[in-house]
Amino acid sequence: MYGSLSRLRSDCLETTEKMTNQQDTPAEDGAVEHSGPTHSGFVALIGPTNAGKSTLLNRLVGAKVSIVSHKVQTTRAVVRGIAIHNNAQIVFMDTPGIFKPRRRLDRAMVTSAWGGAKDADLIMLLIDSERGLRGDAEAILEGLKEVPQPKILVLNKIDRVRREDLLALAAAANEKIAFDQTFMISAENGSGCDDVMDYLAKILPEGPWYYPEDQISDLPMRQLAAEITREKLFLRLHQELPYSSHVETEKWEERKDGSVRIEQVIYVERESQKKIALGKGGEAIKSISTASRKELSEILEQPVHLFLFVKVRENWGDDPERFREMGLDFPH
Ligand SMILES: Nc1nc2c(ncn2[C@@H]2O[C@H](COP(=O)(O)OP(=O)(O)OP(=O)(O)O)[C@@H](O)[C@H]2O)c(=O)[nH]1
Ligand SMILES: [Mg+2]
């Protein structure tokens, strides 16, 4: 019905064409023929919250598949983004940031992140170079010692720090764990990202691709649509509200005129939070809805009618069904 996101309908078309020119021979029917054996594998993006994991995932896939915000704890469950580089299909697993969990949802998020690491062929530890090893990074390095897969270190946000500080940070992290490689990048402006892709394409094992060539994510459209609205909520609302809310797509109706009607519910925990989510005269919900609708029409390439409802569900943070919807195991 709503297939997974496809590469060719995204803005990644340009990248795909570029790769076609450089590496592959286009067959007569326009399909891409690859010379030499194919490589494939799963790479887990692990790191403290706000390190830029989702920004990097989107950059490497060449389209938006995971939401991004300046706030901590944006990503809640593992999101797979699929990239093709040279002869390799690289399946990136964006994971929730790892931090000291307090609520039940926190525990589920952190468990999901470490679960992502277990499923991977290679672990990519992403560190915000400006923050360095302060806070959760230290504990993650400790935890990674127990993980047997090969690991690479990626220092992100190099646009914010001096080169000397970067070298010191790389040395300090490599003292704790011997990483196979260290990269210095900016996920935001793309600097250094090609080197990471070249390395991964080479190092991942030979084998058939896991997904069809044009697929860029395994997230169903309904779920991505809910995530886009949650992103706008994170960007627009302050304090605790984003963390106390959850978005679900309830209805998806394709119309004869080529447009789509989408109904979504924003769950909050208290009546007072509902008031904040709506804003004075409905101003907050209107601006969240406008921003989400605009982005959804771009992704779907069709007009979108978006209807948002805010519902109070006191204990959604303790409801196993909500966790299932998010793709998380319910911790007891
Ligand atoms: N200056 C700069 N900012 C960046 C860079 N990469 C990411 N950011 C910003 O860092 C913030 C966090 O980015 P996210 O991609 O949401 O981080 P994350 O690691 O996925 O965070 P969680 O999902 O909460 O664990 C956003 O405001 C990004 O715009 C970078 O290379 N340079
Ligand atoms: Mg994220």
Image: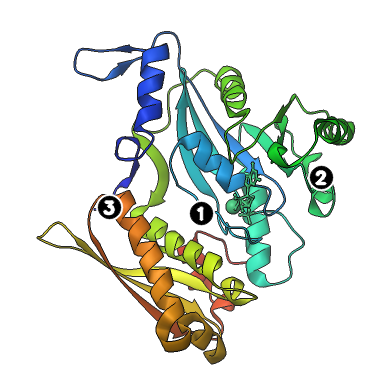
Q: Are marks 1 and 3 in contact (CB under 8 Å)?
A: no
Find residue 221 and report its horizontal and vertical position in percent: 34, 54
At label 2, the amino acid type is: Gly
Near-viewer residue (56 or 42): 56
| Nearer to us in this view, 215 or 121 | 215
Alpha carbon distance from label 2 to label 1: 23 Å
**Closer to the camera in the image, 298 or 54:** 298
Earlier-in-chain disc, 2 versus 3: 3
Q: Which residue is mark 1?
A: 67
Label 3, secondary structure: give it. loop
Is there CB contact under 8 Å for labels 2 and 1? no
Q: Tell whether circle 1 marks a residue whose Cβ is less than 8 angstroms from ligand 2.
A: yes
Q: Is residue 111 left or right of residue 204?
A: right
Residue at horizontal 69 percent and vertical 38 percent from the top: 159
Say which of marks 1 and 3 sits in front: 1
As drawn, which residue projects farthest toward the left? 256
Q: Where is the C terminus found, in terms of image quarters?
A: bottom right
Q: What label sits on residue 2 in the rendered view?
A: 3
**Res 212 visible:** no
Q: Nearer the viewer, mark 2 or mark 3?
A: 2
Q: Earlier in the sequence, mark 1 or mark 3?
A: 3
Residue 76 image position (x, y, % from top left): 57, 59
Of mark 2 and mark 1, the one earlier in the sequence is 1
x 36%, y 37%: residue: 215
